Amino acid sequence: MAKIRELEVMGMPGVWIDVARAIGYESFMTMWRILDRSLVLRSESESMIEVKLRRLSSFHRFQRNRFIECLVTMGFDDKAIQEMVARQLGETLSLSHIFRLAGRRKVGQR
């Protein structure tokens, strides 16, 4: 905990302190080293690392859409897909939304 306290004392933003606590000091330092080596993440003055990370909800949408894609390739109709998404993912999607997602996938399979 003393090592994480040192990060606080140096002025590390709170969100990064939370990350360090969640993954552990050594894992945090490993992540920091990896980010620090990336030239594309450096600020113009090279004094900061500028990280852009998509929202977690974006990843969840991606996973949901892959699930729908899989169901389409297995031959399920839109209503069945709608029910499976609701039951297994807890998400309520309209049939028109399912149709758009499923249609986009079918086009890519031709």
Image (cartoon, rainbow, N blue to C red):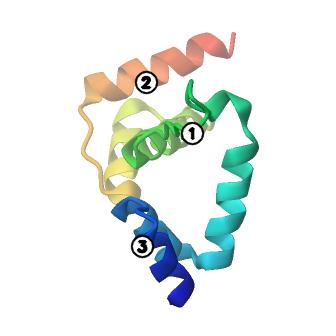
Q: Position of residue 89 (x, y in %)?
A: 38, 56
Question: Helix, strand, or loop for circle 1?
Answer: loop
| Front position among marks 2 and 3 | 3
* Residue that numbered label 2 is attached to: 101
- Secondary structure beneath dot 3 equals helix
**Cα–Cα gap, marks 2 and 3:** 49 Å
Residue at the disc numbered 1: 47
Check residue 98 in the rendering and tell me which mark sits there, or answer none.
Answer: none
Residue 9: assigned label:
3
Mark 3: which amino acid?
Val
Badge 3: residue crowd in 10 Å (few <14, some 14–19, many ≥20) = few
Q: Amino acid at mark 2?
A: Leu
User: Which of the two residues, 78 or 8, is positioned nearer the viewer here?
Assistant: 8
Which one is in front, 42 or 59?
42
- The Cα atoms of the two marked residues, 3 and 1, are separated by 18 Å
Which image quarter holds the C terminus? top right
